[in-house]
Image (tube, coloured by chain):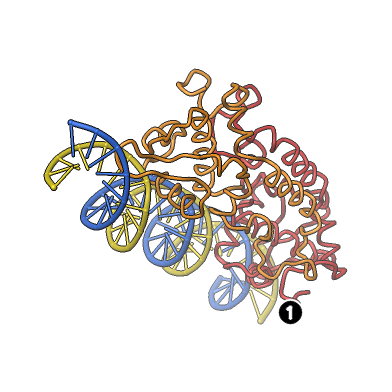
Chain colours: A orange, B red, C blue, D yellow
Amino acid sequence: MFSKSCEYAIRAVIFICTKNEENKVVKIQEIAEAIGAPVYYTSKILQQLCRLKLMGSLKGQNGGFYMGLEHKEIRLIDIVQAIDGDKIFNGCALGLSQCSERNPCPLHAQFKSIRKELKEMLESTTILDLSLNLLKGKTTLKKLNGIIK
Amino acid sequence: MFSKSCEYAIRAVIFICTKNEENKVVKIQEIAEAIGAPVYYTSKILQQLCRLKLMGSLKGQNGGFYMGLEHKEIRLIDIVQAIDGDKIFNGCALGLSQCSERNPCPLHAQFKSIRKELKEMLESTTILDLSLNLLKGKTTLKKLNGIIK
DNA sequence: TTAAATCATGTTTTCTAAATCGTGTGAATA
DNA sequence: TATTCACACGATTTAGAAAACATGATTTAA
């Protein structure tokens, strides 16, 4: 569904957002460990999000990544589009480049409503909401008996 | 969404089914060209489907692949499961191995209905239906001015 | 019966996403 | 202001999917 990069991005952003409740900046080392992703790879992805102003970063001692007030309205769709582009919305399920409304592939109609639902979900879900659920313990990023609930 | 192999598989199966209206066996060469896929790669995939009895094949001169009466009830889900397994139904959207109903990831709830809709669609759609739409010209596997409509 | 056609199968190569590495740059603090 | 810590960024390596190849097995038809 999503690329590995995109999975990491979403996990990271949610995690950082939970930390931001305490107005903290989070180091890449801590992020990578918390979401179970390779450190260098994760940092690359987060740099991409920073460039697009989907999150912030601070260099130097006591530096790290953060999601501030200016990022409270960021939604899942923003992250997904930043990393995976919009092939998830436009891409043909059968991989046909010429597939479109006018020239539909055999599965085009069948996927229409699924795509719509997916897009609406990504558009309406904020990272903040997801992070609040994580904080409340309703959802998890790790194993039940892991460090992070 | 699907792996490349799975895309090819679905395209091929639909195409073969359209040919079967005339009770013909179709050569791998013709199939690969019709669906715009590499010959050797496609043959590998179809062999997999043959082993699972999702289609038939004949060796020797005038041989090829076919979908006979015994395959008329085959549905999209059969093809997808044969090639991609069921990670599309069970796999976590965030790639977390431990994600489950009891230990849901932050997106678990959001993806629930989307998954359900996808699964129901794959279960209810027969290859035959898709091939009939293709024959009627309602859908296409190729460019508008390509050989195969 | 033999040769050609065609699927079957194991191996190798290629390509790209994923992961790693090395060096640069900016900020904090002693 | 020098040192250290942490992100930034380009380059490289790795791994796995995708594609290509080589050879074997089976059927048909001349």
**Left or right position of B45 against A145:** right
Count of labels shown? 1
Give the quarter of the image for residue A32: top left
Mark 1, Cα crowd under 10 Å, few <14 / some 14-19 / many 20+, is: few
- Element type at marker 1? loop
Q: Quadrant of residue B114?
A: top right
Residue B78 in the image: above or below residue A138: below
Q: Position of residue A75 (x, y in %)?
A: 63, 44
Disc 1 target residue? B147
Report the chain holding disc 1: B
Q: Nearer the viewer, residue A129 or A4?
A: A129
Q: Position of residue A55 (x, y in %)?
A: 50, 45
User: Image height check: is A26 above or below C18?
Assistant: above
In the rendered structure, which amino acid carries the disc numbered 1? Ile
Residue A96, relative to residue A6: is it above or below? below
Q: Nearer the viewer, residue A21 or B25?
A: A21
D29 in relation to B124, above or below: below
Q: Position of residue B144 (x, y in %)?
A: 76, 77
Q: Residue at x 39, y 40 (%)?
A: A38
Outermost residue, top side: A145
Q: Residue at x 80, y 56 (%)?
A: B68
Residue B13 point in image, percent of width and height:
72, 59
